[in-house]
Image (cartoon, grey):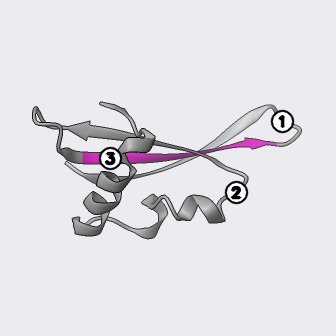
Amino acid sequence: MRLLEEKDKKLYKEFLESHERCNFQQSLEWGNVKTNWIKEVILSEDDKGSIKGSLCVWIRKIPFFRKYNVFSKRTGM
């Protein structure tokens, strides 16, 4: 498993578009709407480097409480 890098964005988008369990909250474009959240995408790959699953994690710092709110969606596997 590894974090999504800039070079992987096209492959990730193709993976999401072809997978039946995908939804809009996993898309990179959703990050343009969620401007006060930090987005991290974790990829799971097979031996050939093909994406087999992903986990999109959204992280937001809660003001005044020094705590974080975390939301995640997964696809595949």
Say which of marks 1 and 2 sits in front: 2
Residue 32 drawn at (x, y percent): 62, 62
Q: CA distance from mark 1 to mark 3?
A: 30 Å
Q: Which residue is mark 1?
A: 65
Query: Residue at position x 10%, y 32% from top?
Result: 47
Q: In this picture, is 14 found above or below 3?
A: below
Query: Residue at position x 74%, y 34% from top?
Result: 67
Tell me the SS state at disc 2: loop
**Could you tell me what secondary structure mostly forms the magenta stretch?**
strand
Say which of marks 1 and 3 sits in front: 3
Residue 43 drawn at (x, y percent): 32, 40
Comes first in the chain, label 1 or label 2: 2
Q: In this picture, is 58 found above or below 16?
A: above
Q: Which residues are magenta?
A: 53-62
Q: Of the residues shown, which amino acid type is indicated by label 1?
A: Phe
* Circle 2 residues within 10 Å: few <14, some 14–19, many ≥20: few
Q: Given contact means CB atoms under 8 Å apart, are the residues at marks 1 and 2 in contact?
A: no
Q: Which residue is mark 3?
A: 54
Query: Residue at position x 48%, y 58% from top?
Result: 28
Residue 5 drawn at (x, y percent): 42, 38
In which quadrant of the rendered view does residue 45 lie?
top left
| 70 displayed left or right of 72 | right
Q: CA distance from mark 1 to mark 2?
A: 20 Å
Residue situated furthest right in the rendering: 64
Q: CA distance from mark 2 to mark 3?
A: 21 Å
